[in-house]
Image: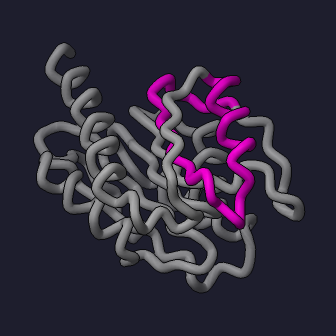
Amino acid sequence: MSEPITKYGNGHALVVFSHGKESGPDGAKIQAMRAVAEELGFKTVSIDYTACRNEVERKALLRSYLSNQVGRLILVGSSMGGYVSASLANEFELSALFLLCPALSLEGYEPVNYQPKTDKIVLVHGWNDDVVPVESSIDFARKHKATLHLVEDGHRLKESIPQLQKWLKQLLDSVVKIDRQV
């Protein structure tokens, strides 16, 4: 996993997925979104955090992986993976950031002053999320002028997978348009 990648599909960016605490690298949401990214010609990777004991180890693992990459990056994170992705967005120039019910300010997590190095940020959060308060995504979106989609769903966003695919495709299409203009 530490082998550098020098070029991503069709000159686009690498899409890096970060799963949640109770999930894994091949969960249903990631599989569905990964299919969208790969269909558009993006290279994808889903980081396996299952051996990590906490968010600090997860951030170290993602930091190590991203440090070995060459090219444009898009981070996609769900729940704790959203926290990890948003945290590392402070350190790495990104083409885009896509966050799903991100655990941005859960008690017990290392506090972060989020200053993402991208202006292409999309958040999706379920109104019925019983794990991460929806207010944290609203506050983050307001502060960073991000696009925010609030859906009638819970923390796992099981009922919203088709919408997630659509919104990720829109975000990736916007990255492709920038690639074509350069």
User: In this picture, is 26 found above or below 130?
Assistant: below
In reply to whether residue 118 is colored magenta, the answer given is yes
- Identify which residue is drawn at 79% across, 50% down: 105
Judged left or right of residue 147, residue 16 is left
User: Which residue appears at 82% of the width and 60% of the height?
Assistant: 109
Asked whether residue 67 appears in the rendered view, the answer is no
Is residue 14 shown left or right of residue 176?
Answer: right
Report if residue 7 is visible in the image: yes
**123 and 153: which one is in front?**
153
x, y percentage for residue 141?
62, 30
Is residue 121 shown in magenta? Answer: yes
Where residue 70 appears, x then y in whole percent? 35, 44
Residue under the point 36% across and 51% down: 164
Q: Give residue 57's position: percent from left, percent from top.
A: 70, 70
Which residue is outermost to the right? Answer: 108
Span shown in magenta = 115-144
Residue at the limit of the structure toward the top, as seen here: 181
Closer to us: 109 or 152: 152
Residue name at image x 47 percent, y 62 percent: 157
- In the picture shown, does residue 94 fall above or below 182? below
Classify the position of the C terminus by image quarter.
Answer: top left
Does residue 160 appear left or right of residue 172 in this picture?
A: right
